[in-house]
Every structure is written in C-alpha cells, then in structure tokens.
Amino acid sequence: MRERHVEHRDTPCHCLQYSSSSAARPLEKVRERAADSAMSTRPEVVFLRWPAQSHERTRLREAGVPALLIVEGGVNPPTDIAPTEDWVRQPIPRCDIEARVSVLRQRTADTVPVLDPAGVLYYDGESVPMSNAQVAMMHCFLADFRRVVRRGELQEALADIRVGFSNNALDLHILRLRKRIARLSLELRTVWGRGYILGWAASEARSTPESPVHRVQVSS
C-alpha cells in the first residue's frame, strides 16, 4: 500500500480588531434564535462591547445566551462574570478568540436553560411554556444561574409587571415555578434568609468546567 504524505502548514494567528458591524449579530436576531441555541450542542456565542453594550449584556444573561465581552481599552472588565460569559481585551489574535468561543460553547452546551422571547423555557432538549410571572422571575434566575437570587429582587420583578408581590404571593409563584421547571429536571433550592438558587435537579447533577480561565492581553 502506498503511503500518503500530507504536508502540514502552520496557520498564522492574525490579530482581531473587534467591530460591532462585523462581529456581533443584532441582538433581536439572537433573541429570536435563542430557542435554536438551546436545542443545539454548539450554542451561538454573541460578541458584545464592554461597557458600551452593557444593556444588551443584561438581556443576554437573562435569556441564558452565552456572550464574549470585548473590553475596551483602559476600561476594567466586569467583576460579575456569569457561567455563560467570558471576556477578552483588544487586540487579540483570532485563534485565541476562537478558542475562547469554543470553550464557552462547551461550557454552556446543554447545561444552561434558555428562555425565548415567547416565554418558552428550553433545556436539555425539552421545553415548557411559562406565565408572565414565571418569565419575570426566570429572567432573574437565568441572569445568575446557579447563584443566589434574593427574594427582594424577585418581588421587584413581579412588581414591574404589576403582579402581586407580597411575601405570600411570592411564595405561591415560587411553588408554581418549582412544579413547572421540574419537568425539565431543574429545581429551585431555598437559601434560608437570602433567596433561591436555580440549578439542576439532584438526579441530573452534572459536572461543568470550573477551572479558572487565564486571560492574557496579547498585542500585535
């Protein structure tokens, strides 16, 4: 059998200068495709300029959509990086940014629920519709997935949509939300005196990459 010789060539690493017109997909399109991202093993990662697009960042966090923040020169990166996020500073080699995107996709694939604009929650190939009150609360939980969300924050979210926000009303909404998300193998854990944590049900607990990400500023 004749051996096949393959010539290997090194691909140069070009520096990437971020621009909102070329790198980021319009936010509205991303939100429309949130459901598709939830059903994919390779969810779409959105590029956002920090701090210029901080408002869009909040919306993506609430929807559970992964995002790579491009930190502008001379600006400190955010300190509240979510599991669905990472950040880099310009200029950065294209191969480095592609590696970051790949890690984000692996980190969030089938591990973070996604709420689409129609109020349907997607997770692990399943979906459930949510009421207006549940959507308001789920935005809070997805923005801080697997972290404590205080009762006061949930009450404010319900008040914003003019839903009763007394302690008894909140307890009732939490009870209903627990039953709804149980279909997706998700659960709300009570942190006494503080609030609640949205996470995977005990029977579905899984490991996710928790190793720290080392960020190095690379110049051209």
Image (spheres, rainbow, N blue to C red):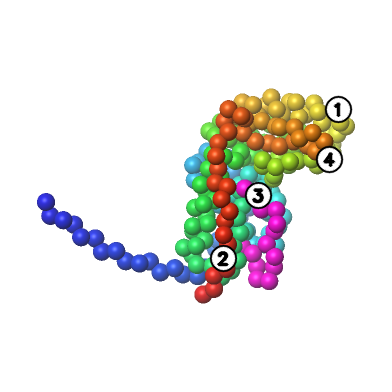
Query: Circle 3 sits on which residue?
Result: 82
Q: What stretch of residues is rendered in magenta? A: 70-83
Q: Which residue type does callout 3 highlight?
A: Ala
Query: Circle 2 sits on which residue?
Result: 216
Most extreme residue toward the right, as rendered? 166
Q: Are marks 1 and 2 in contact (CB under 8 Å)?
A: no
Q: Does the image show residue 145?
A: yes
In the image, which is nearer the foreground, mark 3 or mark 1? 3
Query: Circle 1 sits on which residue?
Result: 168
Most extreme residue toward the bottom, as rendered? 220
Q: Position of residue 63 (x, y in %)?
A: 65, 44
Earlier residue among tags 2 and 4: 4
How many residues crowd mark 2 within 10 Å: few (<14), some (14–19), many (20+)? few
User: Which residue lies at the image location 49% right of the left edge and 58% below the top edge?
Assistant: 98
Q: CA distance from mark 4 to mark 3?
A: 20 Å
Q: Which residue type does callout 4 highlight?
A: Gly
Q: Are marks 3 and 1 in contact (CB under 8 Å)?
A: no
Q: Secondary structure at mark 4?
A: helix
Q: Are marks 4 and 3 in contact (CB under 8 Å)?
A: no
Earlier residue among tags 1 and 4: 4
Q: Position of residue 178 (x, y in %)?
A: 70, 27
- Residue 196 higher or lower than 217, as above or below: above
How many residues crowd mark 1 within 10 Å: few (<14), some (14–19), many (20+)? few
Given residues 120 and 177, the one toward you in this image is 177
How many residues crowd mark 3 within 10 Å: few (<14), some (14–19), many (20+)? some
Asked whether residue 71 is drawn in magenta, I would say yes
Q: Secondary structure at mark 3?
A: loop
Q: Which mark is residue 46?
A: none
Q: Secondary structure at mark 1?
A: helix
Asked whether residue 37 is drawn in magenta, I would say no
Q: Position of residue 179 (x, y in %)?
A: 69, 24
